[in-house]
Image: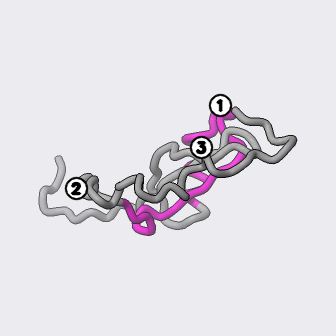
């Protein structure tokens, strides 16, 4: 039976990012609880790379991540359409660069 007055004594939460292959970007895979960074890496390896899904891992304390709030969707995410220099149409693609 759970004690309703019990405080939260769980280990800190770590966010896990995996890289599927060398050169690919890291993607958020999920979260693990761990006492320290080394244990977080081991837990992340056990949970998120069991079937060879990744060749590299990052673990970051959740408290170190700063995120925007859904209420920030106004000027914070304004694309700046009045600043044409931010758009890539003014740049020439160097010879030998493959355009997708």
Residue lying furthest right in this view? 96
Which structural element holds mark 1? loop
- Disc nearer the start of the sequence (3/1): 3
Q: Mark 2–mark 1 contact, CB under 8 Å?
A: no
Badge 1 crowding class, 10 Å Cα cut-off, few under 14, some 14 to 19, many 20 or more, is few
Residue tagged 3:
46
Residue 51: numbered disc? 1
Q: Tell me what residue is drawn at x 43 percent, y 64 percent.
A: 65
- Camera-nearest residue between 16 and 21: 21
Residue 81 shown in magenta: no
Which structural element holds mark 3? helix
- Of tags 2 and 1, which is closer to the observer? 2
Classify residue 28 as left or right of residue 3. Answer: right
Residue tagged 2:
71
- Disc nearer the start of the sequence (3/2): 3
Q: Tell me what residue is drawn at x 17 percent, y 47 percent.
A: 1
Query: In the rendered image, which quarter is residue 19 located in?
Result: top right
Badge 3 crowding class, 10 Å Cα cut-off, few under 14, some 14 to 19, many 20 or more, is few
Q: Please state, as top left, top right, bottom left or bottom right, where the C terminus lies in the image.
A: top right
Residue 45 shown in magenta: yes
The span shown in magenta is 39-67
């Amino acid at each position: 039976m759970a004690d309703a007055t019990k405080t939260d004594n769980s280990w800190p939460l770590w966010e896990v990012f995996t890289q599927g292959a060398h050169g690919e970007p890291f993607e958020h895979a999920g979260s693990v609880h761990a006492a320290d960074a080394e244990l977080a890496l081991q837990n992340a390896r056990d949970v998120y790379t069991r079937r060879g899904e990744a060749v590299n891992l990052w673990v970051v304390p959740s408290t170190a991540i700063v995120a925007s709030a859904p209420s920030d969707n106004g000027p914070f995410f304004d694309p700046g359409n009045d600043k044409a220099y931010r758009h890539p149409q003014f740049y020439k693609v160097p010879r030998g660069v493959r355009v997708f």
